[in-house]
Amino acid sequence: MSAKSARNEGTGLAVIRAAGIVLVRAGASAPEVAVIHRPHRGDWSLPKGKCDSDEHSAVAAVRETREETGFQVVLEAGLSVQDYEVDGQPKSVSYWRARIDSGHFVANDEVDELVWLNAMDARELLSYPEDAGTVDEALAIGPTVPLVMLRHGKAESRSQWPGHDDDRPLAPLGVDQASRGVSVLPCFGVATVRSSPSQRCRNTVEPLGAALMTEVVLDPKWSEEYVEASPRKFSAYVKNSIEKEPAGVICTHRPNLDTMAALLAESSPEPWASVGGKLSPGQAWVLHRSSSQPGVIRAISRLSL
């Protein structure tokens, strides 16, 4: 949390939640960024807007971009949050680098013009210095392919479950998290779903598989038993997954994720520096892997369902 955010908490005012993107496409000689003109504000900005009351910021970023520009986008790496005040009220804007999936720009009441600019021209045109910094951050990361490493949703208590641990189901909160994943995870363009065979993992991603119309592949190598019995083989499997797994979701357990994180932090320490501690149930690390360098992690986002 930034110092400004802490001061905002002290005001007692509700924080305005918003989300936006840096929309990037390949240019003739360098990447180009979309900059929009908002006639009601008379400014040049990045696509962004307020989150609905209980809307996930990733979902809001995709929805607001579609409403403002006509483009359906896919989110890539998460960027730094912008914290500031609007008329004395704190506002927090989450940003992602993004690419176009479909659609075309249509002028509307909110946005009457969209221009594609190289980094230098975008920085000069943007009305707010913070946006220029966000553009620089997005372009430094480059295009990526996501691999969502998801810890299963909140499960029934291990100590109170009478059956085999592999059969332990999700608790009501976990069911809600699984439902939320149906709207949040497709924002990153995932196409495949892989899961530990345990009931709580399967329950977490089966709704997502149904929404994507893809089979949930049950993979014993992401079970707790496999990492305990074969830590070296598991480490090799992690490296292979990072290099070769397509854009997708892998749902597994805390011990597997802890082992994976320790392994990857050794080889890619910089992306892990800002991720924070261990994942709670229903949280994920989105590994943003370089599109041109297999196995290279360019950034990591922390995501909560």
Image (tube, rainbow, N blue to C red):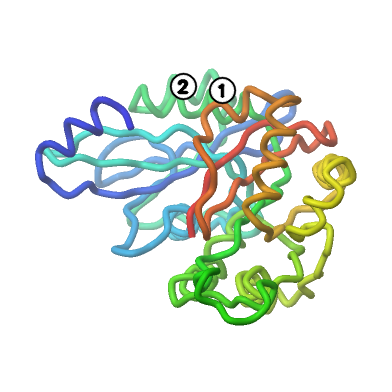
Decide which of 105, 199 is in the foreground and name it.
199
Q: Residue at x 49, y 60 (%)?
A: 305
**Where 28 sits versus 94, above or below?**
above
The span from disc 2 to disc 1 (Cα, nearest Å) is 6 Å
Decide which of 142, 65 is in the foreground and name it.
142
Is any atom of residue 68 visible in this view? no
Residue that carries the numbered disc 2 in the rendered image: 123
- The picture quadrant where one finds residue 7 is top left
Q: How many marks?
A: 2
Decide which of 212, 241 is in the foreground and name it.
241
**Circle 2/circle 1 CB separation < 8 Å:** yes
Residue 163 position within the rendered picture, expressed as x and y whole percent measured from the top left: 63, 81
Direction from residue 89 to residue 192 in the image, left or right: right
**Where 134 sits versus 184, above or below?**
above
Label 2 sits on a secondary structure element that is helix
Direction from residue 175 to residue 81 in the image, left or right: left
Residue that carries the numbered disc 1 in the rendered image: 119
- The picture quadrant where one finds residue 143 is top right
Residue 18 position within the rendered picture, expressed as x and y whole percent measured from the top left: 34, 48
Residue kind at label 2, given as amino acid type: Arg
Label 1 sits on a secondary structure element that is helix
Is any atom of residue 22 visible in this view? yes
Q: Residue at x 61, y 27 (%)?
A: 139
Residue kind at label 1, given as amino acid type: Ala
Q: Residue at x 12, y 36 (%)?
A: 10
> For the residue carrying disc 1, how many other residues have a C-alpha within 10 Å: few (<14), some (14-19), or many (20+)?
some
The quarter in which the N terminus is drawn is top left
Residue 200 position within the rendered picture, expressed as x and y whole percent measured from the top left: 62, 71
Decide which of 139, 127 is in the foreground and name it.
139
**Where 198 sits versus 227, above or below?**
below
